[in-house]
Every structure is written in C-alpha cells, then in structure tokens.
Amino acid sequence: MRAQEVLAALKEALGDGFRDGEIRTRTVGVKSPQTIEEVWGRIDRGVLLPAVRALKDLGPLHISIISGADVGEEIELLYHFAVGFGTEGGEVMVTLKLTIPKSDPVVPSLCEVLPGAETTEREKIEFLGVRFEGIPDSRHLFLPEDMEVHPWRKDEPELAGLVKRKVKWEERDG
Amino acid sequence: MGELAKAFEIPIGPVHPALKEPIRFTFRVEGERIVGVDIKPGFAHRGIEFMGLHRNLVQVLYLAERICGICSISHPVALVQAVENAAGIEVPPRAQYIRVIVAELERIHSHLLWAGVAAHELGFDTLLHLTWKVRERVLDILEELTGNRVNYAIPIYGGVRRDITPEQYPRVQEMIRYYRGLFEELCDRFLNDASVEARTRDVGVLEPDEAEALCAVGPTARASGLRKDVRQDWPYLVYGDLGIKAITPEDYGTEPRGDVYDRIVVRLLEVAQSIDIIERCLEEMPEGEITFIPKIPALLAQLKKAEGEGIGRHEAPRGEVIHYVRLEAGKEEPVVWKVKAPTYSNLMSWYPMFEDQEIADIPIVAASIDPCMCCMDRVHLVRGGREELVWKEELLKLSREKTRKMALGNG
Amino acid sequence: MKLSSFKRALWVFHVASGSCNGCDIEIVAALTPRYDVERFGIRLVGTPRHADVLLVTGPVTRPMAERLRRVYEQTPDPKAVVVVGGCGSTSGVFYESYNVVGPVDEIIPVDVYVPGCPPRPEAIIDGVVKAVAKLEKLEAGETV
C-alpha cells in the first residue's frame, strides 16, 4: 500500500474534517535504499471514528499508541496507526492529530472499532484527564483510582508536591 | 448452594517470586476453571516519560535504556530513530549495522531467557538451567562488544558509541557456530518433550482474529499465525536490505494454533533467524565512521537547535516498540516523549488467553506473552490489596503437580 | 571470609520494587549453572516468611513502598537486607519523579549495598556473603 492511497482515502472519507494532510518521506537502508512514507494530518474530533473506519477498510489496522501533550488551553492527542500491519514492506504509519479544549476534554472511544485501543485510552484518562465516550472500562490502569492528579498536565499544582526532589536547589540558592 | 459458593476470586501478586516483576491479577474461578480475570499493572511505574521531559536528550537516552533491563537496546534504538527523524540527522552505514548486530544479540539472550522461565513455570527446572547456561555465551559476547552484560549504552543520536574491532569478529563468529551446533538439541529438548507438549498444547489460545482486533504484537501475534514484524513491514536501519521475513509456526511445518507451544516454536526459530542476521551483518558491514557528531557537547548543541517531530519503531524481542518525540528549538529537553513497550499492546490479549483455563495453567499462560512490567509501567501507582503475598508459590506448586500427574498418566 | 560462614543454608527472597529488570535477571543468572549459588546453600525462596536475606531491587515506586515495608515485617529475625543495583542504593537515574519514593534505605533498614547498573552476578553473590557475615555476628549477639 502507498501513502498516497491512504491520504486519498482519508480526504475522501473526511472532507473538510481532515486538514494539513502531508506525506513525509525518508530513505532507509544501505545496500538497497528504500523510501519510507508516513502520513500526517489533523482532524476534528467529530470525524475520528469515520477516520478510523476509513483506515480499517484499507487493510489490517493496528493502533501503536496515542501520544498526548498539554498545549496551553488545549490538549493535543496524536493517534499513531499502522495501516496494513503485517504486510511486507507495505505498512504505512499514519499519525492523526486532534486538539480538544481542556474545558471539554471528550473524544469518542475507538474500542468499538478497535478493541485493542483500550489500554492506551485508559492511560490517557489518568495521565491527561481526557474522557472517552463509549469506552468499556474507564477505571485507572496504571495510577490508583483515587489519584486525581494528571501527571502530564502542566496546570497541576499538586503534582509538584508529589515529586521527590533529591537536591533542593531553591533552598540552597536562597 | 448459593451463588456465593460457586465463584471465587483469587488475587495474585503484586509480589511474585516467579515473574520477578510486580503486577496484580484477580481471577474469578469456578472450581478449577477460570471464568474471568482483571489485571492491574502499574507497580513498577516510575514516571519515566515525566522525568524525560525535564532532562536533556542525552540524559533521556540513559533513562530510555533503563525502561527495561532486558530490552535495553530496543528502547534506545527506537528513541534515537525518533530523534534522528525529528532533527534530520543522518546515521553512518556502519553504525546502522552495529545497531542491528547488538539488537539481534539482545533478541537471542531475551528469547533464551524466556524459554528458561517458561520451563521453570512448567516445573522443568533442568531445562531452565540448561537454557540459562547456554545463554551465558551471548552475554559474554555482549560484554565483549559493549562492556556490560545488561544495559549496553550502544546507540547515541546519529550513531553508536563503540565500534566492533577486527579482533572481535572471530569471537562473534565462534558464538554463531556454537549456537548453530546447539540449535537442534535445544529444539529437541523443548519441542519433542512429551511433558512440555502436554502442558502447552492448546493452552492459552489466542485466535488470529482476536490477536488482530486486540492489536497484539511480536511473537504473541506471530504464534497465532499473523505475519507481523516491524523489521519486515516497516523497514528501518538495514533491516530492509536483509530481507527479513516474519516467523510463524508454519515455518516449523505446523499449522498455527496460537497456543503456548506455538509461542515457544516462534521464539526458538527467531533465535536461529537472529544468528543468521548477525552473520550476514558481519559480512556486509562497510568500514567507516560510527557517529554523526562524536562529541557530546556539540551533539547537544545541534539537538538544541533542532525543531520537529518524529517516530521511531523497533521490533523488540517481545514485539513493537514505538517512541514519539517532539523537539522545539532552544530547548534541550523533548517537549513530548511517548514510549510504547510491547507488553502494553499484548496486555489485552491476556483476557482471551486466560478464559476457561485451569488455575494450574496460570503461570505458564501469564509468562507466555513474555510480559515485561517494567517496560509497560514506565508511566505509572496502585493501592489496596492485602492478601497478595504467598499465592504465587502455591500456584507454582500446583503447576508442577499438574506436570507430574500428566507425566505419570503418560508413562 | 572462611567457608565456616556457610554453616547453614541461606534462603533469599527477592522483591522487585519497581526495578528495570536488569538486576532481577542478574539475580536469576546467579542461580544458574555458571554462577550456581546453590553450591553455597543459597537459594531463592517464594515467600519472605522463609527467608534470611531480602534482596531488594529498584528505586521503590510509591505503590511498592507499603508492600516493601510489609515484606520486611514478614521476614523473621535475624534478617539482612541487600540492595542490588544503583537505583535501589541511590535512586540512580530515577530522580525527581512523582512516583519514586526511594531509595530503599528510606523505606526499610539496609545492611549491604551492591552498586552497579546492573551489578554482575559475582557482585550479587558477594553482597549476600557479606550479609551472611552480618547475620552471624547478629546471631552471636555482637553489634555491627
């Protein structure tokens, strides 16, 4: 499968919901160099499920991970998929970015289309405070159930209290 | 009898003598049958990604290496690729070959380690000692090439830290001959042994469609017949040149059944595959530089200027590792760093595997995906649990009694 | 040290308190034929209640701190605690995290430190041997 096909399929399925679509290429190998193509793009949360369905129609779909970051007033989620997982030399990495406001951190869950996404979605619940609509199990996975702090958020004043400092530079300097 | 008397809950973990790592399982059992399982990881969570966001990239590399002591090259290889892709750094050809050689040596040591642990879980300690004895040979070579038995510190952004010198070649080749000579015996000991077969055939089955839906990776997926291997599907380093094919039980001449036995088959065949890869790399490896920028301060200065994002992937012994890194100009630390270890993907596949198994099969089924909690738990805390200490030993005893009973039945 | 130190078999319990697996694997390696600690009567047991020595690896994560304390309390006296690895001894690279509360000596009393990342199996055996000496002194009523 080529990255072009993936990009075209996403554009067709999502229309205006898919923006900044690009193909990033680089060459790997020494004796017989090959070109590796990656698809990157930005989507709205409303078209997340259609996007995943469109990718799934292209071949065996694997979700590698959902990365996330706190970018000020918003949370950015990056869905890393491997489309055509298990086809020799034919796997395309697709990264779909979407931003959600901190005031309303809700995205649809992928579990209905891709049950394997549950682990990574549960991780985002505890670490970024994102809510997934339709996730079968939303308990904390790695952090305790009563831990309210989301370690990857930058607006968590309580987090500093949990961090154990070896050297208290502030006191030393003062 | 009321409902209450029918189903029991057995908590196991987080302190397990056999797995060596903390995780908690809660099994619901009816008699000897498992009807449900709940898994709670997170005991080894050290918050590595969080720490990484407050350190410079070279320090992050040390952290990445200590995500897991068994995959201590898999995580750095994925991380350096992610950073190289983000910063547009070229890696000299020789360095790419050296990375592949060390990564494959690690696969040999990891698979042999697993095979030994699996034998131990079955109560076959002689086999544990045999496999771990032969495993020492690859550790000797790793120590020779990198200076340490574990945590090799080989990859650096844009290259590797140590070259393989001409006098080391014969020693590596000798190791290759040693394992080739031993391979048949090892396969015979594991795969033609009646008690191993009785305990692992049709135990902990993962159907191919389940493996695909649950996004299983590595030998766990391949044992179910899915030809998924990052080295084959998404060429990186020199793996594209080597023409690697994913291994499934079909290569052993049997139909994949996705059980524990098949997972042993896949891992043993991959040891042979890794030996071939190392031999070819030694032959093909060109002379030349091994780093892009040899001096660390210059490298850090270059990385500080870099801006961009990148993905690095690697097929670790247990499956796909992926790192995502985002760099911003003027910052020494990564702005975003996300790590995914193979067990993270394979966690979900435990649910169908445990379904309808016997309590005595818990240790071998749990071990069969080659779980690595420390990898998975990088980011993670748990509470509660009172009754969790002594169970595992009891369980191991049960597992061993089952082997004994089966052996008596057969013989 | 004289071999008379090994007048009885020493049973060891291993606790991983959030380690990276490197030390844990080296502990197992110490049991297998090349290093073979069982020739000294040292063996790994499955419960702290049978143990003379605790081998602790890892920087101690927040959830494991409580459990480590309980394992320590369950180990009968006289007991010795050996910390295996750099991160258990000093926290090592795992500093300044919200989930690391170690090093081990801030949670339970430690007798012997084995530094290294990871220490070689020989070093781990040496650590246990030093712990034996300490146990014997304690048994004889000497202070250490």
Image (cartoon, rainbow, N blue to C red):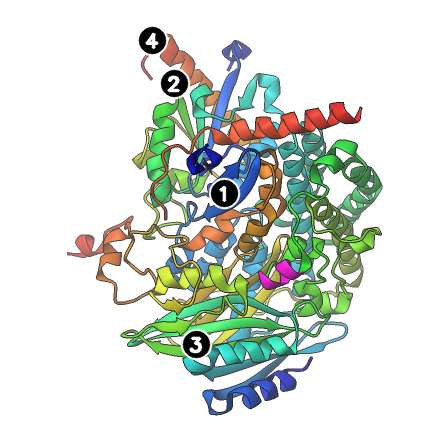
Q: Which residue is mark 2?
A: C76
Q: Spatial distance from mark 1 to mark 2, Cα to Cα?
A: 29 Å
Residue that appears at 44% across and 61% down:
A136
Amino acid marked by disc 4:
Gly
Q: Nearer the viewer, residue C32 or B225?
A: B225
Q: Is residue B343 visible?
A: no
Q: Is residue B70 above or below residue B238?
A: above
Badge 4 marks a residue whose secondary structure is loop
Q: Give the number of the disc on residue B305.
A: 3
Task: Specify few, some or many for label 2: CA neighbours under 10 Å numbering under 14, 14-19, or 20 or more.
Answer: some
Q: Nearer the viewer, residue C70 or C20?
A: C70
Q: Which residue is mark 4?
A: C141
The answer to whether residue B226 is left or right of residue A164 is: right
The image quarter in which residue A92 lies: bottom right
Asked if both marks, 1 and 3, belong to the same chain, the answer given is no
Tell which subunit mark 4 falls on.
Answer: C
Tell which subunit mark 2 falls on.
Answer: C
Task: Specify few, some or many for label 3: CA neighbours under 10 Å numbering under 14, 14-19, or 20 or more.
Answer: some
Question: In what quadrant of the picture does the N terminus of chain A appear?
Answer: bottom right
Q: Is residue B352 above or below residue C50?
A: below
The image quarter in which residue A91 lies: bottom right
Q: Which residues are magenta?
A: B209-214
Q: Spatial distance from mark 2 to mark 3, Cα to Cα?
A: 57 Å
